[in-house]
Amino acid sequence: MENSYQRLLKNNRSWAQKHIAKDASFFKKLSVGQSPEYLWIGCSDSRVPANDVTGTKPGELFVHRNIANVVIQTDMNLLSVLYYAVDLLKVKHVIVCGHYDCGGVCAAMQNQDFGFVNNWLRSIKEVYAKHKTELLAIEDMAKRERRLVELNVMEQVNNLAKTRIVQRAWKNSTLQIHGWVYDGNNGQIKDLNYNKSGHSDMEDIFRYNL
């Protein structure tokens, strides 16, 4: 009997064969290197596969995912990905994409003790506290959660703008940061029209003298 994980290996062989059938040199071209235009910072949720929802091919999207797509200034994993994408790959766009019905955001709205995960959810709780007046005015809990998803994305865009990596790029390039939300109910991405291409609207204390 085939184990469930073996199905993945079988699917992989089928996937590879299909690409080779279309283009015999497909994987050889990919092995030469990558030059994606986009860095995707998304949620780890298995229902939001970055390449699938954007219709992009291998090599077009550089991807980092974590619970609730947060940008924490001490997260060396994220900062390393950001540095590699911006400084070495020279991506033109950084996209923070959250999604409605996000488990991390829903958990952050509660007072329940989630153990170790509390540490990760802390930054989302701070977004909630920052926008508490607006959020509490929304009586429908589902709508309140959807709004927090959006506010969380916008806050992470702000956090990216506060990094030295991004600010250095703005001195020498036209790097843009975008805030999006994926809606699993219809499969479509909502552009929040919350974009950053410079730190003109940033408080002075967060600007580096570069």
Image (spheres, rainbow, N blue to C red):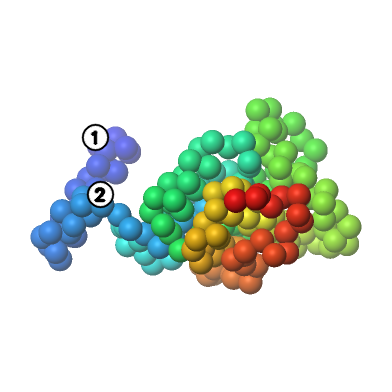
Q: Nearer the viewer, residue 68 or 31?
A: 31
Asked if residue 210 can be seen in this view, the reply is: yes
Q: Nearer the viewer, residue 40 or 147?
A: 40
Give the quadrant of residue 190.
Answer: bottom right
Q: In the displayed structure, does residue 11 sit left or right of residue 42?
A: left
Q: Secondary structure at mark 2?
A: helix
Task: Give the mark nearest the N terminus, 1 or 2.
Answer: 1
Q: Secondary structure at mark 1?
A: loop
Q: Badge 2 local density, few (<14 within 10 Å), some, or many (20+)?
A: few
Farthest residue, direction top: 115
In the image, what residue type sits under mark 1?
A: Met
> Which numbered marker is on residue 189?
none
Q: In the displayed structure, does residue 155 sit left or right of residue 58?
A: right
Residue indicated by mark 2: 11
**Residue depicted at x 53% and y 42%:** 79
Q: In the displayed structure, does residue 1 sit left or right of residue 85?
A: left
In the image, what residue type sits under mark 2?
A: Asn
**Residue depicted at x 60% and y 51%:** 210
Mark toward the viewer: 1 or 2:
2
**Residue depicted at x 77% and y 35%:** 112
Residue indicated by mark 1: 1
Q: CA distance from mark 1 to mark 2?
A: 16 Å
Q: Badge 1 local density, few (<14 within 10 Å), some, or many (20+)?
A: few
Give the quadrant of residue 100.
Answer: bottom right
**Residue depicted at x 40% and y 62%:** 37
Give the quadrant of residue 1.
Answer: top left
From the top left corner, tell me how far across and down residue 192 is, in percent.
64, 69
From the top left corner, tell me how far across and down residue 177 is, in percent.
57, 62
